[in-house]
Amino acid sequence: MTETLTRPSRRPTAPPPARRPLEAGLTGAAWSVGAGLVAIALPVLLVWAADARSGADAGTAMRTAMQVWLAAHGVGLEVPGGTLGLTPLGLLLVPLALLVRAGGHTARECRVTGLRDAGILALAVAAPYAVLSSVVAALARTPQVQPVPWQSLLGGLLVGGVGTLLGIARATALWRLVPGLLRERGTRLLVGTAGALAVLVAGGAVLSGVSLLVHLGRAGDLAAASAPGIVGGVALLLLGLLLVPNAVLWSCAWLAGPGFAVGVGTSVGPFGTSLGPVPALPLLAALPGAVPAWVGSLGLLVPIGGGVLAGLLVVRRLVGPTWQTALREAALAGPCAGVVTALLCWAAGGPAGGGRLADVGPSPWQVGLAVTAEVGLGAAAAAVVRVRLTP
């Protein structure tokens, strides 16, 4: 009893003081860059060590890993005869995931409570992240491969800012403030546009997956054409997986009508296909050939169907709308979906070298205009019909 009375009471310890954004940002940026380089360097070094045919030393392998890390940020690599600027979007998920984690951790350390704090912290991470990206670009430079300096700075700033903001929003539930900022009209438009894009991307995923299954034999022939061996086969498989998001967006462009290119002077679309020799990449076995015009017309129903869903979602949030109001509100989903699709197509394409491969992927402005018209038409028609049929 005496021991209990004389034991000192435990007072609750005060929480540690909030860290300054600049200090937390430097730490988060350095950790994200270091972890990203390690995550990408490990498979690159494993492939290098396992490939007996490789005459490169460890320093060259490390510079190759740095170049791959830069390519994940959309940085162009100038090589003899052209530029490698096609970003495997699956590879982009590596730095984004690390930045989301770093953003959430720094948000808790700095006790972010509002959008202003979130913006300051995101800049505090993105700015040093961009500087470190430029340092990596300088270290990765070789006589044969030269990263574009301004793209390393801009790519680091964009990827660092976006990834950090996502992490901050995830950790602090700032998503709840978005409806208040957008107000009712903006929220309706956001929901409708998201619905249209979800339908289009789902359609692209189904189309690319089915096409690859149908042409699975051709994919095996392409994989065996270059006799890559076990190590090379694993590398080809990994590259194909990293390019899956690109293939989905290319399929979206096919469904929208303009299609995409796999080299200068080529086109792959629902109403005509013109192809020459293509690289021996198994994923390219899914390239569709010429299809009847009615099949291509059916493909256009996917973005139009996305517009129909957008129109229904917009009308659902309107209170007592007239058909004129519903038409005006729903039609705005078309331009919004078109702009987002154009940006995604821009990210999914780019040069894959010199010569014929200087033009690979969809045309952003053509796909954007097509999606604007198709989604806008479907949304407007669905909204008007829905209001007319409502008693």
Image (spheres, grey):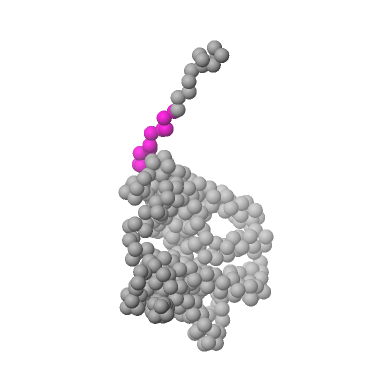
Is 33 above or below relative to 300? above
Which of these two is toward me, 258 or 110?
110
Residue 5: within the magenta?
A: no
At 61% from the left and 69% from the top, the residue drawn is 282
Is 382 above or below relative to 164? below
Q: In this view, does 197 lie to the left or right of 319?
A: right
Give the image location of residue 229, x and y in percent: 67, 62
Which of these two is toward me, 289 or 8?
8
Number of numbered discs overlaid on the protein picture = 0
Residue 17: within the magenta?
A: yes
Residue 211 visible in rendering: yes
Which of these two is toward me, 319 or 148?
319
The N terminus - image quarter: top right
User: Secondary structure of the magenta portion, mostly?
Assistant: loop
Q: Is residue 317 left or right of residue 255?
A: left
Residue 142 visible in rendering: no
In the displayed orientation, state which residue is furthest to the front.
Answer: 391
Give the image location of residue 361, x and y in percent: 47, 72
Residue 387, located in which quarter of the rendered image? Answer: bottom left
The C terminus - image quarter: bottom left
Give the image location of residue 368, x and y in percent: 40, 74
At 65% from the left and 53% from the top, the residue drawn is 50
Is 56 above or below relative to 349? above
Give the image location of residue 16, x and y in percent: 41, 33
Is 193 above or below relative to 10? below
Residue range highlighted in magenta: 13-23
At 43% from the left and 73% from the top, the residue drawn is 312
At 55% from the left and 87% from the top, the residue drawn is 292
Residue 74, located in which quarter of the rendered image? Answer: bottom left
